Structure formats: structure tokens, C-alpha cells
Amino acid sequence: MEWRGRRLLLAAKEPGAGAVLAALADQNSPAPSSAVIASPVAAQYFVARPWPVLIADSDFDAAQARSLLEEKRPELVVVGAGAGASIEKSVLAAAQELRIEVHAVVDHFWNLWQRFADPTTAARWRYVPDLLWVPGDACRRKIVRQGAPASRVRVFEHPLFTARAPLVRLPGSAREALGLPGDACVLLFVSEWSLPRSRVWQWEGPEREEFAALLRGLLEESAGATRTIARDYRVLVKLHPSEREGWGALTEEFDPSLSLELRNVDQALLFGAANAAFGLNSMLLLEAWRAGLPTYSYHALASDSTDWLSTHHAGVRELQSRRELGAIIRDLGRLHNASTEQ
């Protein structure tokens, strides 16, 4: 990526962008004089890094971006690729006005052209970086078909696909911090921000009812397994930071002790407390896999699709039926029983 030793300005709106830019910067060693501009939810990924982190307000615009660029004088600007109005778009536009080279890094497999469209009109390719980095050849082919200049598109190895950490099972401090029983089998449900259907924007991604089906399955199967294998279960409901609506209307149908809903929480606590992670397309699932957790994607309502997270990463196991989900939950409980009895 040719970042080594160069003075960068990194810009990120969403957590996924923050995670991937921080990891790539770690790998590519930019100059110590580099800097970061990020939203609060993306800024957390740059903690303990050597570069100053500036927090962008919700009204951060191109004029503020230009002032920042004139102050920091980066040799290269590297932005994430958030949809809609974003820090990245403001920084990209200002950098190009100042004739500073701009690279954009896409951290996901879906909604590709939408990330570079006009946030008001959805006009495609309103924003075009000098280089556009995507995670894999399939992504490159897709975004070029959608109109990205082929000469500007590059493929990078996503850091979340590599360097899996050894799993440290059941650290008591993580469960204690979250108020969970130390001997429970803990299932992490990774929710996502579901975008509304639009003929103009043509958003890709699962519908909310698909997430509801998974969460209901986790709760019902956990409650059933508690009775059949004598193992206490807990379901951790991790909300996306941009998700406005929680899952209380569903979880309140069950015993209140069965689930715990969390929005902003340290990932080390989440992954340390959980026995396994379940979701659909969230890149947080890959972070869970990287942390050593068994990781599952559930497609019982749309099993005919050929484009899921499990399609792109072999570490994510695809579940296509409620029966299969229940079997996994019971197996996790039995394994947990065996590990705690040793």
C-alpha cells in the first residue's frame, strides 16, 4: 500500500472503517506525524496508537476538512468508505481540491457503489479516489461492473481474514464485568443496521426480519437447551452503534435473565465472555473469529442466496435451518459442561 514512512491523514466514519484502517496502519507503519479524524465510534480503534485522534462532530464538513488538511499537510489521505454523508467524503473532496493523493479502503463486500455516490441524489461515482482498495477479487470485479474505473481499483488482504488469536476461554473478569454467571454458556448475537429498501439506492443486505428470526431462534433454543442438558445460557445482544431500534420488544417475551442488550462495549469483554458468535453479514463476526470464537452466519430465511459472509470467508460457518441452529446451541452447551467439569 506504500504507506510506510509517509505522513498520512486517516479518516473513518463507521466502526468497520476504523477497525480496518487502524489494522492496516499497524501493518504499514506510516510516519509518527500522521493523524486521524474519526467519529466517536470509529475513533476507539485508534486508542494506544501513536497518532493523534481528532473526533469529528456530526456537522463536520468540507470547509473543516480543508482547514484540517492545511494544518496537518499530509503526503497521503486514506479514507474509509461510509455510505451517505460522511467524514470520508468531506475529507476526500477537500484533499482533491488541494491536489493531495487520496486512497479509499472498502471494508465490506456489499453496497459498494453506494459508498461513493452523492449522499443526496444517489448519483453514482460523485466521489472517486485516486486508488480504491477492496477486500478480494470478487469485490474488485463487482465494483468495476458497477462503474468504478478499473485502473484505480486495487485488492488488499483484509486484516480480519488473517492472524487468528488463540482463544482464552471463559475469563471470569469479562463475565463479571458484564454481570454474567461464570458458568453460563454465552451466545453472542451480532445485530446490524438494516437499511430501508430503496429503488434509488438499491441497498443490499439482510432484512430486519432475518435478524429477528436468528435472535428468536437463539432465545428459544437456549431456553429449551437449558431444560434438556441442564446448562444455563445467556444471549448477549450486541447492537450496531448506528442502530436506532433495539430488540427489547422481542427479548421481553422471554425470561429477563436470558438476554443482555449492549450497544457500546469493549470488544475484549464481548469476545472474552462468549462461547460463540452468531449473525448474518457483520464484519464484527470476522473480528469474533479472529479472536478465536466459533462463528456462525444464519440464513434460514434466505438460504438460496449465494452472497453471504460465509461465502467470502471460510472461518464463518453457514447455518441454513432452525434445526441446525438448535443442534449447534446444544453442542456448545455440552462442550461448555465438559470444560467446566474438568
Image (cartoon, rainbow, N blue to C red):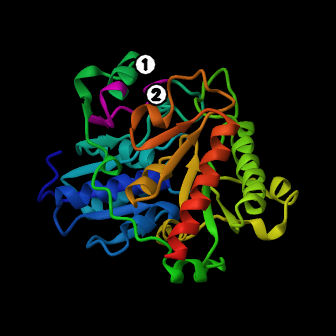
Quadrant in the picture for residue 333: bottom right
**SS at circle 2:** helix
Q: Which residue occupies 22% across, 50% down?
A: 76
Q: Which residues are magenta?
A: 124-138
Q: Earlier in the sequence, mark 1 or mark 2?
A: 2
State the mark number for residue 146: 1
x, y percentage for residue 77?
Answer: 27, 50
Q: Residues within 10 Å of mark 1 (few under 14, many from 20)?
A: some
Residue where numbered disc 2 is placed:
113
Give the amino acid type for the residue marked by disc 1 in the picture: Gln
Magenta residue check for 125 = yes
x, y percentage for residue 324?
Answer: 63, 39
- In the depicted structure, whether residue 235 falls above or below residue 128: below
**Drawn side of residue 211 relative to residue 248, left or right:** left
x, y percentage for residue 246?
Answer: 75, 56
How many numbered marks have been drawn onto this rendered protein structure? 2
Residue 13 seen from this side: no
Q: Which residue occupies 51% across, 23% down?
A: 306
- In the depicted structure, whether residue 95 falls above or below residue 147: below
Which residue appears farthest toward the left when viewing the image? 5
Give the amino acid type for the residue marked by disc 2 in the picture: Trp
